Image: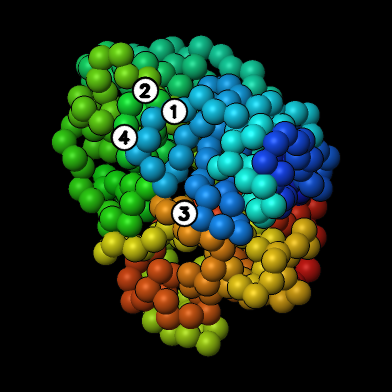
């Protein structure tokens, strides 16, 4: 029997850092347990006010910012000004560094900013990949013709998120549990069938994903970024669950095989928000801490599709081997289907067969 997980400390590849903005410049040191790492994909959000979400990555380079809650194109701003060996530098941009406002930074490690040309597809892409963690950052330019794009994972991606860089476009999400339907990260919209000949009609392979001639995905001279994820046992899980409308801690238990650090949840049958829970947020009435909750309850959350501050958007219990909705909130536990993306704080069983402690 093989190892349960090859990643004993998930914080070697993903970590959450809480910080307070200063409105000027500052360096943020991440608090990864496995030794500080140089992040390649950073998603920030103000927790203490209605400041927006911001995404920056080392493929596109420091200062090039996206907004997950918005269709807005890539903008050159003084946000993340450098990717450091143990965190990142911030400029004065208020989205990521508003003065005296608490923020969160979710950080993923890819390949230290080192990219390679990928010609596996008919459209050559620039790829930064970490096959151990199942994550790649892909940038490419289209010419208006259908084609395939190399993603570098060496495995079939379970989630692909695409955003246009040089024009307005929604954040299209292809999730393994919704098949040929798509979701929009910047919208409450339910999962929808394919909007014409786009990327969702053809299953991705271990080397490429496909795009058609939809104007959203493929215009002459269009530049795009894609974030691709392949599930890794004990570290990441991308799946779905059926809610049961029960409250009081009697919601549907979702097994992930690890103690979650971050869980992103989206109802798929009707319009509802994208809910982000993080173990470090704590409860609605706490400010969060580097150690997370004293218990399992995680009531404080953010919404990826809009800019509200940290609040109660649907409680969940974050457990040693998964999560469970505590409330009957429509955002997490109606009698409906939900998809999720979860990243680990600790695997349920280590590579040596040692179970993690309960929480």
Q: Tell me if residue 328 comes above or below residue 288 in the rendering.
A: below
Q: Marks 1 and 2: CB-CB under 8 Å?
A: yes
Determine if residue 320 is in view. no
At label 4, counting other C-alpha atoms closer than 10 Å, the crowd grade (few under 14, some 14-19, many 20 or more) is some
Q: Position of residue 322 (x, y in %)?
A: 59, 66
- First in residue order: circle 1 vs circle 4: 1
Pointer 2 or 3: first along the chain: 2
- Residue at 72% from the left image edge and 57% from the top image edge: 346
Instruction: Give the class, few, some or many, for how many residues have Cα within 10 Å of label 1's Cα (few <14, many ≥20).
Output: many
Which residue appears at 25% of the width and 31% of the height?
Answer: 216
Q: Which residue is mark 2?
A: 166
**Residue 102, position in %: x, y?**
67, 55
**72 in relation to 186, above or below:** above
**Residue sitting nearer the eye, 7 or 326:** 326
Residue 43 spot, x, y in % from top left: 57, 42
Number of the label disc, if any, that sits on residue 307: 3
Q: CA distance from mark 1 to mark 2?
A: 6 Å
> Who's the residue at 33% across and 51% down the image?
187
Q: Mark 2: which secondary structure?
A: loop
Indicate which disc residue 74 carries.
Answer: 1
Question: Disc 4, disc 3: CB below 8 Å?
Answer: no
Give the residue at mark 4.
169
Lower sequence index among marks 3 and 1: 1
**Which labelled disc corresponds to residue 261?**
none
CA–CA distance between discs 2 and 4?
Answer: 9 Å
Q: Check whether the beta carbons of the residues at disc 2 and disc 3 lie within 8 A of each other.
A: no
Q: Residue furthest left?
A: 196
């Amino acid at each position: 029997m093989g190892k349960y997980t090859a990643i004993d400390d998930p914080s070697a590849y993903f970590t959450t850092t809480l910080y307070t903005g200063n409105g000027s410049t500052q360096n943020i040191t991440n608090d990864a347990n496995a030794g500080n790492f140089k992040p390649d994909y950073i998603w920030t959000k103000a927790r203490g006010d209605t400041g927006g979400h911001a995404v920056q990555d080392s493929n596109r380079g420091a200062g090039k910012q996206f907004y997950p809650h918005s269709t807005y194109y890539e903008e050159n701003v003084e946000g993340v000004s450098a990717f450091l060996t143990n965190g990142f530098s911030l400029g004065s941009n208020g989205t990521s560094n508003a003065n005296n406002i608490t923020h969160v930074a979710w950080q993923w490690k890819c390949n230290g900013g080192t990219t390679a040309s990928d010609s596996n597809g008919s459209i050559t892409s620039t790829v930064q990949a970490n096959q151990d963690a199942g994550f790649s950052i892909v940038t490419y330019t289209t010419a208006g013709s259908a084609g395939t794009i190399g993603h570098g994972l060496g495995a079939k991606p379970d989630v692909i998120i695409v955003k246009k860089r040089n024009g307005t476009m929604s954040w299209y999400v292809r999730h393994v549990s919704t098949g040929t339907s798509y979701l929009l990260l910047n919208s409450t919209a339910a999962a929808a069938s394919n909007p014409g000949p786009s990327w969702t009609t053809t299953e991705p392979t271990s080397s490429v994903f496909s795009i058609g001639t939809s104007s959203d995905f493929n215009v002459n001279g269009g530049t795009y970024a894609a974030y691709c994820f392949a599930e890794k046992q004990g570290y990441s899980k991308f799946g779905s669950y059926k809610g049961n409308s029960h409250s009081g801690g009697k919601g549907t238990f979702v097994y992930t095989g690890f103690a979650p650090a971050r869980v992103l949840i989206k109802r798929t049958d009707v319009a509802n928000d994208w809910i982000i829970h993080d173990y470090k947020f704590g409860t609605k009435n706490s400010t969060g801490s580097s150690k997370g909750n004293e218990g399992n309850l995680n009531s404080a959350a953010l919404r990826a599709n809009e800019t509200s501050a940290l609040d109660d958007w649907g409680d969940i219990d974050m457990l040693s081997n998964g999560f469970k909705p505590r409330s009957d909130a429509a955002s997490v536990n109606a009698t409906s289907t939900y998809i999720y993306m979860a990243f680990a704080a600790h695997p349920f069983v280590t590579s040596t067969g040692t179970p993690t402690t309960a929480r």
